Image: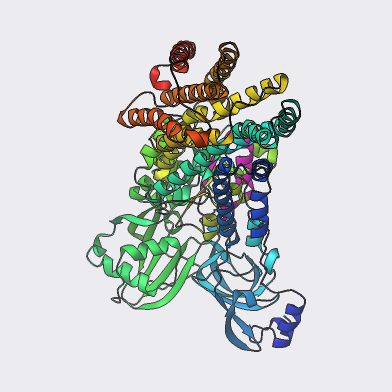
Amino acid sequence: MTNKFDLKQGLTQLEVEERKKQGLQNDYEENVAKSTKDIVYDNVMTLFNFLNFGIALCLLFVGAYSNLAFLAIILVNMGMGIYQEIHARNLVQKLSIVAKESVHVIRDGKEIEIDTKELVMDDLVVISAGEQVPSDMEVLDGKAEANEALLTGESDLIEKTEGDILLSGSFLASGQVYGKVIHVGADNYAVKITAEAKVHKPIQSELVNSIRKVSKFTSLVIIPLGIILFIEGFMIRDSGIEASVVASAAALLGMLPKGLVLLISITLTTGVVKLAKKRILVQDMYSIETLAHVDTLCLDKTGTITEGKMKVQKVEVLHANYHENFPQIIGSYLAESTDNNITMQAIRDHFELSNRFGAVKTLPFSSERKWGAIEFKELGTVYLGAPEKLVAVDRLPKEVIEAQENGYRVLMLGIAENMPLDEENMPYLEPLAVLEIDDPIRQNANETLAYLREEGIDLKVISGDNPVTVSNIARRAGLFGYESYIDMSTMETEADIRRAVHDYTVFGRVTPQQKRTIVRELKDNGHVVAMTGDGVNDVLALREADCSIAMAEGDGATRQISNLVLLDSDFTTLPDVLFEGRRVVNNVTKVASVFFIKTIYSFILSMICVFTTIAFPFIPIQITLIDLAIEGYPAFFLSFESDKRKVRGKFLPTALRNASVNAVLVVLNIVAVYLMGQNQDFTQMETTTLMYYLLIGISCMAVVRACLPFNPLRIFLAVTTVGGIYVAAMLFHSILEVGFLNQQTLPIFAVMMLINIIVRIVIGLFQMKRAGKTIKDL
């Protein structure tokens, strides 16, 4: 070994400075997230906003200020979008696997404590039990056992001796080593795993995507339609520039589903608040909706199905001579032992320490030997480890065999009375006691898994642990198909992995990359996939999943990267999220037809106006009143109602189909009134008033239908919506540029509305019969 790696000397300060100049320092921080400027730009400079602001500028130019009220909806939409992205960006930027803590290094012959960012290539680091490895390094001296569960998912401890590699992000469970830093910054194993995850995940929302589809379609026709309508008004009808702009703006604004986007955001936000009260942190509000569509849930074993906390659940003292003083024996063993792995922590939590017996010699637990031992003056040597390593198989106590068959971890104490400790030659041991250790199944896990399966969600357990162990845990949790398991370490190609996805329920010995491949294969086959996890080994799969769910007790990286964080680390709360998602989707789908009526009839009427050169019958302020009183008011309150039904069908086709009947009725009524006005010499004010009142009436029919079946709240909403908007129309008639129904127009209004109601009921009954639905499905 050269002086540069002398265990007593380490690097000199000059060598440290040289490496810093070369960029070989552990201070790498990747920032691939969008800047605040980019986020604001992306949310403001959209085609949807461009069209709305373009219409607003035209209205502003001609002084039609009262018709600019619709801008409030656009500004709120924009603000919520900007906030959501900045919030998500900030969470992703915090992603870090290796904790920003201090570390002990040897420099210039002295052991000093520095920040992990100050590490440089070839630094000589001293790592002891309980400490996290800050950078990839090669062991130069010493012996230790590393817990790499957060990186690999494998819960077994890995022995590390001279020449072995310690991976950044792992922990030492026992021992102490001197290690030479071999990777810094972006080259570290932990950073490579999370580098792919440090990208903001795009919004996955059927509701939002549907709105974008509608906006994209209307955007293609709005500009040419607007130009044609303006030219017709200004040049053909000679209506004047203000009247031409106002009429054209009303036609175009009606096609853009402004209010529905805002309703979706408000509905999801209320879901976020409700789930927060149940200790579920929602980091991406659209994930609530996504989970409502999930048909496949991938569960990690440790920390998800199980509590992730080893507990001693049963102790059987087997040696009659030591029944009374067994607590002092195990207490003395724990007091003298330096072992600190998760199993030993569970034993320490169960027993009290004792100084009754003094140790002569100590041998730490080794994952290679599978046992440790301590020699006591008055007893001899006490051994603790895997039962099959301490005694012959034919001498295993029946308690050991029964516990192993039930999937529990079993440790045994054996005693060699009055015998010295010999690491090379284990003497004949007498079984002293059996410790049955369990990673407890989460309370209500059985009921939760059974419920999810009943709801049509396919469950798969993916773990880095032994597949037999995972299968036994799945069996105890009541997972259907637990017996169908596979060891993924036997899979050689990606094609093998993808085939196995469809044949098995339980996957053991899975690498982080294999977890991601499993999720990809499920998604490639049309499944909507949710993934739970708590370790760095889950990060790649969590990023790939449609909805990612982390446990608060898990690694910080998984918490920062996931859509949802279960603050109590209890996956049995997932049905609550599922119910919130269903509430959002079902309620928005129910009321969306009210919003899309305006989009459909505005488009059809615009096309009629283009071909007939007739002015669009409404103005923007009239449309805005309908936006607020008919679309916004009842939809807002209906969106809070509970609705746990399974989501059926696609949102956009369902909403458009339900809206189309009322939209067509609006068009027919407008055309009929126009023709009557021409034949009966209605004044322009009478014609406009009758058209607007019929538009309100048909829109209110959609609200009543959305309120079915009635309950006290829905009756109240239906009555106040119908009564409220007509009162508002009469109170603000001058601003709305409409009059009152008179002796000539009132009978026509009553007859036409009666016909509209009858037609809508008949069509509704026909649709119900054809679909095999009842009134509750309306």
430 is higher (above) or lower (below) than 644: below
Q: How many marks?
A: 0
Q: Quadrant of the C terminus?
A: top left
Give how far across and how far down residue 621 sits, in percent.
55, 36
Q: Hey, which residue is sitting farthest left in the picture?
A: 324
678 displayed left or right of 397? right
- Give the quadrant of residue 333: bottom left
In magenta stretch: residue 408: no
579 is higher (above) or lower (below) than 27: above
Q: Quadrant of the N terminus?
A: bottom right
Give how far across and how far down residue 90 sits, in percent.
57, 59
Give how far across and how far down residue 127 sits, in percent.
56, 74
82 is higher (above) or lower (below) than 506: below
Give the image's coloring scheme.
rainbow
Give how far across and how far down residue 269 sits, in percent.
47, 46
Front residue of 334/345: it is 345
Q: Which residue is at a point 61% across and 35% down the rendered structure image?
A: 253
Q: Which residue is at a point 46% across and 11% down the rendered structure image?
A: 755
> Can residue 35 be seen in the rendering of this structure?
no
Front residue of 349/89: it is 89
Q: Which residue is at a point 38% across and 35% down the rendered structure image?
A: 641
Highlighted range, magenta: 513-539
Front residue of 331/626: it is 626
In magenta stretch: residue 533: yes
- Give the quadrant of residue 176: bottom right
616 displayed left or right of 273? right
> Can residue 490 be seen in the rendering of this structure?
yes
